[in-house]
Amino acid sequence: MVEFDVRRHVLVPKHEVMPPEKAREILEKFRVSPHQLPLVKASDPVAKAIGAKLGDIVKITRDSLTAGKAIIYRYVTEG
């Protein structure tokens, strides 16, 4: 059986786990706590593929027709 890498699909934007120091900078920049960020479950196929663990912050970079690039941060929760 050939395993499919979901990250290579054309509709899946770039996901990356933020290092702890960068995650702290992001939280300070936006003056939020991790739980105030949008959530992504640890069971999400892309979260699994990038090795995201509970409590991590994931940076998602997607193309945007209006902004060029849109960056979104999500907090990894149970699931």
Image (cartoon, helix red, strand yellow):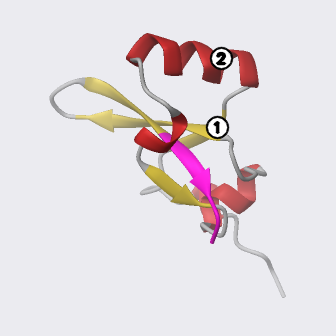
Image coordinates for residue 6, horizontal then vertical, percent? 62, 64
**Residue 77 lies in magenta, yes or no?**
yes
Q: Relative to 1, is 59 above or below?
A: above
Q: What stretch is highlighted in magenta?
A: 74-79
Give the quarter of the image for residue 37: top left
**Residue 71 lies in magenta, yes or no?**
no
Q: What is the three-letter code of the residue carrying label 1?
A: Glu
Packing grade of label 1 (10 A; few <14, some 14-19, many >=20) is some
Image coordinates for residue 46, horizontal then vertical, percent? 62, 59
Q: Which residue is drawn at 47% across and 46% down?
A: 13
Q: Do the residues labelled 2 and 1 touch (CB within 8 Å)?
A: no
Q: Nearer the viewer, residue 18 or 1?
A: 18
**Chain-order first, disc 2 or disc 1:** 1
Residue behind mark 2: 22
Image coordinates for residue 33, horizontal then vertical, percent? 49, 31
Residue behind mark 1: 16
Q: In this view, does 18 lie to the left or right of 29?
A: right
Give the quarter of the image for residue 16: top right
